Image: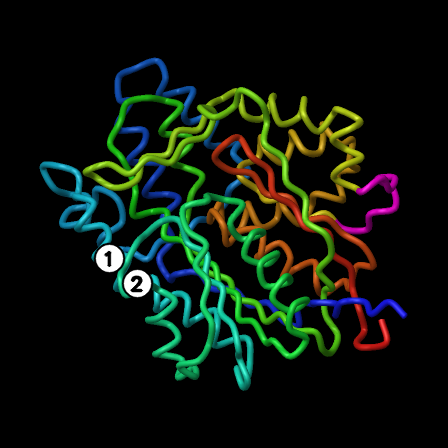
Amino acid sequence: MTVLPPQPRINAIASAVPASECDTTYNAWAKRQLEGRREAGLLDRMIQRSGIGRRFTVLSDAQTYQAEGSFYDVPEPPSTLERMAVYAREAPELALAAIAQLGTLDGITHMVVASCTGFTAPGLDQVLARRLGLAPTVERVVVGFMGCYAGVTALRTAGHLVRSDPTARVLVLSVELCTLHLQPTDRLESLLAMGQFADGAAAALVTAEGPGLGLGEGVSLVLEDSHELITWTIGNTGFAMELSGEVPGRLAEALGNPEVAQTVTNGRPLSAIDAWAIHPGGKSIVDAVERGLGLPPEKVATSRAVLQDFGNMSSATVLFVLERLMTDRPASGIALAFGPGLAMEGLRFGWTNGDGG
């Protein structure tokens, strides 16, 4: 008799954002970079059409972007060392705020941490395990510097751990402090790209027991000749994001290919998929997925709502979307996220009531 592997499922997801809003102050700073130039008007119009209403930062209100006495109000941009010092101080606090909403962490056996906006050693995984009082025997995995799709990779990793060990209780965490990497520039494309990013954290508990969002097969795709479309480079003044304006078009073109669409859905018709957790990397990204796959607008409404409320929090964002979708207990769904490469990482999911399915 064939013994099926256990069904991993997300029992709970919780999220947290910092207290300080930064969208208004960033937009004012960005406009100053183009003062007196024709692009300033275009920047303003594109900001209004961004689909973003609020973004949050770990920097305090007094420190937010170029305000007098702020983190960025210095003759030269803060060094990578200075930015990492803030990350080391603030990332654990934001992560713990999300984890605190999950409930009991009794019996945690594994921990998967995703973050691409900072580096520390000892790592964030060790810092959090110690502050949470987890057993020293907890096995830890760090998913680093993969970009916006790392949240999907972290969940897939948790699913693999549960399939290999039915008793595993996996704490998944994604925390990103994107606002630490502002770079002074007068390039319109760069200003628009930076204007989408924000700080946030999300945590999930993945086990083989109880009701939850069952985790199915993964999906991976790297577009040919696309390695320069999204880059995330470590420099002397933080991490520099380059996001080509070609990305939405290339993404829509790829997803519009029937073979790619069949791969994403595993051969199922689009109408059979109840929920879509699309990483809202920006309004144009959600538009591209909607157009490429031919999805009804309501299928991407949750992704647009998360973008409106929080902006793009890199790898944490798709977990914010899944958190909202969980309340509907969808029978079937697909999560998709995009990042450097240009690469797509996905995960199929569907509600399970417990051991009986």
Q: Which residues are magenta?
A: 266-275
Residue 95 appears at what percent x and percent y?
41, 66
Q: Secondary structure at mark 1?
A: helix
Q: Residue at x 51, y 49 (%)?
A: 150
Residue 55 appears at what percent x and percent y?
43, 49
Residue at the disc numbered 2 = 90
Residue 268 falls within the magenta-colored stretch: yes
Q: Residues within 10 Å of mark 1 (few under 14, many from 20)?
A: some
- Total marks drawn? 2
Residue at the disc numbered 1 = 86
Magenta span: chief secondary structure: loop
Q: Residue at x 39, y 75 (%)?
A: 129
* Image quadrant in which the C terminus is located: bottom right
Q: Secondary structure at mark 2?
A: helix
Left or right: residue 295 compared with residue 301: right
Residue at far right of view:
1
